[in-house]
Image: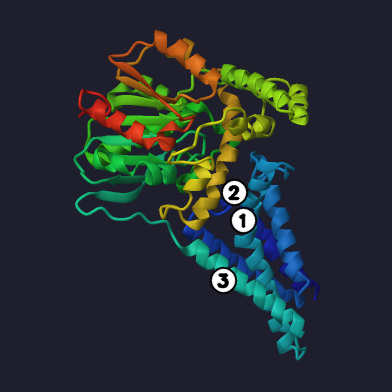
Amino acid sequence: MRTRMLLASTLPLLWGAVAGWWTPRGPGTVGAALASVAVSLAVGLAAGWLGRSRWFMLVAPVIFAVAVELVRLRLRGPTVDRPHLSGFGVVALLAGRGVHGLLTLLPLLVGAAYGAGLARRLGAVPPRRLGRVGVGLLAALLALVTVGAAVPGRTDPIPGGIARFDTVDSSGRELGLLIRGTDRSAPVLLVVPGPPGGSEIGAVRRHLPELERRFVVAVWDRAGGPRSWSGFRAPSGWHLDDEVDDLVAVARHLRARLGRDRIHLVAHSGGTIAGLLAVRQHPELFAAYVGVGQVVSLREADRSQYADTVAWARRTGRTALADRMTAQGPPPYRDVWAYEPLLANEAGAFPVDREGASEDETGTVGNLGVSEYSLLEKVHLFGFLDGWDVLYPRLQEVDFRRDVRQLAVPAYFVDGAQEVPGRLRLFDEWYAQLQAPRKDHLVIPRAGHRSMFERPEAFVPYLERLGTDGGPGGN
């Protein structure tokens, strides 16, 4: 009896340790998700059989969860840290532990129930009817979860063109991207998303499909993004240089894959930091640089936004928010939780005219409906919180007014007229001193920080027009 109980407890303990090492932030691919479900189900069956009790429906998942949490103590980020009582905290809990639990704890529970039930049946002890119904419902839920996780993302084919997912090796990690274009010989345009761990595959497919007629468009998921889930680094080894190296690896891959000498780079928001540095360090790889919502100095931009947000909160009667932010003091901060009041209130403090806009106020979330995202990848889109939490505080010393005053390739910039004012002021100051073979700045009316997606009718012709006179669309 003791031996059986020991084995019944040891199996989920060992599986938890393996899962915590193998998929510390949860399964990131269809294969890993299905493997997690299968192993958890088998371990649950064995634990229930050996334990001869449906108590192992609770015991096995608890032992497994404790083992996982202990193994991944080295990690950092909202999806793996202690739960946080805030809007971001709820999202992180559901996207992290919630999904991991559905793919591991649920099959452990169901397996343990059926294992114990089988042992009781063979022992001539009939299972209770109510228990059978409850377990059956859980099994049906597990079947739905498994089917949902098994459906991969897909992209519509382009007759005579190119439409494919691709992977890039960078320091032994796989980074994912989507490549689409009606003409394989067209110039290559690489799109870099904003936040660390970010993805704009949905936004580009939904709002910028017209670019595919003029370019071969490659959209990269940054390390930790839905199609680059395995690209998460240990917090101690994740720095700006790593992001630049990843971008350079993607650029070189595209040159080799598509047979081009140089590619055109479009970077958005936080992606402009790694993008600008990659262009400065490796101008031989790039035909032109396009910065949308260009970062100049995170520290100064955030402090200006902080002051404006506190003033807005007091002006509009949001006294609790204003008091909280005042007590906290101005940025920089050490984690995403401290930045949450600033980020969560940006849309209110700096409103954008959405009438007739292609992308509404839901932003990235509203772009999840594209077929290119699997169900698992849609959830993993919120993994950017972990990348942001680790990397953003390490970018506070970036100041391109000091660090980048000259580029060896043409440089083009796009902003929304309703961008956060402090960001625009910093950009104007830096742009005035920037030296480049050619430079230009487009300000799109009735657009904000995500201007390229909000007003594609202005952004797409800008790229195409530049292409006729040696800009980003040139060969």
Which secondary structure lies at badge 1?
helix
- Does 113 appear above or below 473? below
Q: For the view shown, which residue lies furthest in the bottom direction? A: 124
Q: Residue at x 70, y 71 (%)?
A: 47
Would you name the residue on which mark 3 appears? 143
Instruction: Using the image, tell me which numbered label, if any, was put on residue 316.
Output: none
Side (left or right) of 121 relative to 189: right
Way the structure is coloured:
rainbow
Tag 2 near tag 1, CB within 8 Å: yes
Query: What's under tag 3, amino acid-wise?
Result: Ala
Would you name the residue on which mark 1 appears? 100
Q: Residue at x 33, y 18 (%)?
A: 440
Where, by quadrant of the figure, is residue 333 drawn?
Answer: top right
Residue 48 % position (x, y): 71, 74
- Does 247 appear above or below 331? below
Query: What's under tag 2, amino acid-wise?
Result: Arg
Alpha carbon distance from label 2 to label 1: 8 Å
Would you name the residue on which mark 2 appears? 25
- Does 393 appear above or below 93? above
Q: For the view shown, which residue lies furthest in the top direction? A: 433
Residue 417 % position (x, y): 46, 24
Alpha carbon distance from label 2 to label 3: 22 Å
Q: In this rendering, which labeled residue sits more in front, label 3 or label 1?
A: 3
- Does 315 appear above or below 41? above
Determine if residue 106 is in view. yes
* Nearest to N terminus: mark 3 or mark 1: 1
Residue 300 % position (x, y): 58, 16
Alpha carbon distance from label 3 to label 1: 16 Å
Q: Residue at x 71, y 76 (%)?
A: 134
* Nearest to N terminus: mark 2 or mark 3: 2
Query: What's under tag 1, amino acid-wise?
Result: His
Which secondary structure lies at badge 2?
loop
